[in-house]
Amino acid sequence: MRIPRPVHAFLAVALSSGTILAGVEGERLEIVGGSADDQAYARAAAGLLPGGLRPRGFDPDRALEAIRATDRFRAVEAEGGRIRLEPWAPLAELKWRGDAPPALRKAMTGLPRKGDRVGDLRMAELGNQAQERLRALGWPKAQVKVLREAGGARILVAVEAGAPD
């Protein structure tokens, strides 16, 4: 029995790839979950062609890594010929708590805005930037914690500035 060539390609990719997204060039990869914008964002990050088609040399593992690296999604999972997305909740409020000096908020750049999907990487960056700015403003012992509340819709920046220099 002779196996058709596309099946050979599929089997070769399926056996060599670590994901279950293996397929052949030109085959459509479905992205489910999230909004239409989330799906378009994920398609672009994965390097898919218009219509969700796999380009030549498509690497499913790298595609999943690229989507996760956008920091927009809480979970990205491969299921059959699909990628399932679970986006972070859109930010409703950025709250400050503690004794942050007023100059801190003015010194901060790139603060998340209402509607942004803020992932773990961006939250860590927010905390690091606040810590650095506080030190530069003369509060070397300041402590900053960035926490997620209300299922991710609210971000709390808790600052314990302590005594200035």
Image (cartoon, helix red, strand yellow):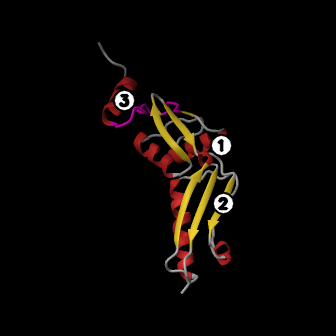
Q: Quadrant of the N terminus?
A: top left
Name the residue carrying label 1.
37
Q: Earlier in the sequence, mark 2 or mark 3?
A: 3
Q: Nearer the viewer, residue 40 or 96?
A: 96
Q: Tell me, for residue 9, which label it has, or none.
A: 3
* Helix, strand or loop status at disc 2: strand
Q: Residues within 10 Å of mark 3 (few under 14, many from 20)?
A: some
Residue 154, image x, y percentages: 64, 52
Q: For the stretch drawn in magenta, what is the main secondary structure?
A: loop
* Helix, strand or loop status at disc 1: helix
| Viewer-nearest of discs 2 and 3 | 2
The residue stretch that appears in magenta = 17-30
Between the residue at mark 2 and the residue at mark 3, the CA separation in whole angstroms equals 52 Å
Q: How many marks?
A: 3
Residue 17, image x, y percentages: 34, 37
Q: Earlier in the sequence, mark 3 or mark 1?
A: 3
Answer whether residue 47 is visible to the viewer in this image.
Answer: no
Q: Tell me, for residue 95, which label it has, or none.
A: 2
In the displayed structure image, the side of residue 136 where residue 24 appears, left or right: left
Residue 165, image x, y percentages: 54, 87
Q: Is residue 77 above or below residue 8?
A: below
> Does the residue at mark 3 contact the one at mark 1 (Cβ under 8 Å)?
no
Q: Residues within 10 Å of mark 1 (few under 14, many from 20)?
A: few
Q: Is residue 22 magenta?
A: yes
In the displayed structure image, the side of residue 28 where residue 19 appears, left or right: left
